[in-house]
Amino acid sequence: MTEQNNTIAIPKLHEVYKDYFTIGAAVNALTIQRQQELLKTHVNSITAENDMKFESLQQLENQFNFEIADKIVGFAETNGMVVRGHTLVWHNQTPEWVFLAEDGKPASKELLLARMETHITTVMRRYKGRIASWDVVNEAIEDHGNELLRSSKWLDIVGPEFIEKAFEIAHETDPNAQLFYNDYNESFPEKREKIYTLVKSLVEKGVPIHGVGLQAHWNLNTPSLDDIKIAIERYASLGLKLHLTELDISVFDFEDKRTDLIQPTKEMLTLQSKRYEQVFSLLREYKDVISNITFWGVADDYTWLSDFPVKGRKNWPFVFDENHSPKQSFWKITDF
Ligand code: HAH
């Protein structure tokens, strides 16, 4: 650390990690304004948090609206950042009309596949050559129990092949894009094995898939470092690239529903910094298989976790605080 004009020089995250991975953040129309200095300084990869989801781009059939998505891609290009596209096929944030025929009955398989094709080709063509990687299918795996695939309208109407169809259309549309399957709870053994099974079957069938996105919505205690390590090795054994697509470290365990805090406790911040230190030290060991680490936000003034899983409860999951200053966590991941 050096002193320059009485200010402490803060290392730039993406420079610190230039020999390891690109460093990303999820953004929206507001945060590319309010957090622009932080973003421009520290990240070289951008994901739209919501603005490339189906409901954002095609709220009504064949009426595409790319206004905000274009802004976000423009922001990235102006600032020399790559873009991760998120996401083409998902059971959430997808409008009802997609799954309905004109008579209000469920869409036929043919109709739904035609709509999938229109959506993927229209979106990917617009950003061809400008979006390096796409989360083609998001969260298709069932969390618990014996079912492999999550029950969804995609599955009900098209059958399990909706997944490979999505990858095939995506690959045909932009053969240079890196195509990812993305999911959460990816490091817990039960879900890990299911994701592995799905992705392995895609690879074996020759489906054009290039990577696995580990969402990495983690907290102070789980998943364990061992489980993270095993998950990385398991997915990497399929010969695919890995991205951590949505990293945040909640200060609350998932089951902890307390709502009394208006600031994180000192203990939480210390535990969080140790956790970030251990997590990044592990991730650095896997730089040959992990090529991007994207935070699902950038600073504690805005996070989806302030509405999930407890509505309206503030959370502080990042390495920059609400005033955009580096937290202990930041120093732990930059000083190694
Ligand atoms: C993610 N789901 C989505 O991929 C992303 O698009 C959204 O903005 C936020 C989180 C995560 C998720 C979870 O961790 C637990 C249950 C459901 C969904």
Image (tube, rainbow, N blue to C red):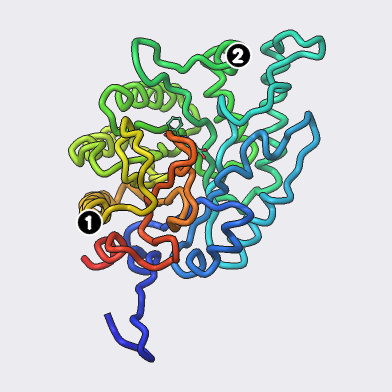
Q: What secondary structure is marked by label 2?
A: helix
Closer to us: 231 or 39: 39
Real-space CA distance between mark 1 and mark 2, rounded to the nearest whole angstrom:
48 Å
Mark 1: secondary structure:
helix
Q: Which mark is residue 152?
A: none
**Could you say where residue 310 lies in the image, as x and y percent from the top left?**
43, 35
Q: Is residue 158 above or below residue 216?
A: above
Q: Nearer the viewer, residue 40 or 124?
A: 40
Placement of the C terminus among the 4 image quadrants: bottom left
**Residue at 29% in and 51% down:** 288
Number of marks in picture: 2
Question: Is the residue 83 above or below the residue 158 in the image?
Answer: below
Amino acid marked by disc 1: Thr
Instruction: Please give left or right for residue 295 compared with residue 227 in the image.
Output: right
Residue at screen point 70% across, 10% down: 106
Residue 209 drawn above or below residue 131? above
Q: Give the farthest residue toward the front.
A: 260
Instruction: Give the farthest residue toward the left.
Output: 226
Which numbered mark, 1 or 2, is in the foreground of this view?
1
Going from N to C along the chain, the mark reached first, 1 or 2, is 2
Image position, residue 11 (x, y; %): 35, 73
Residue marked by disc 2: 158
Q: Position of residue 234 (x, y in %)?
A: 27, 33
Q: Amino acid at mark 2?
A: Val
For residue 270, which numbered disc appears in the image?
1
- Residue at left 65%, top 42%? 124
Quarter of the figure with the N terminus: bottom left
- Report the front residue among 279 and 219: 219
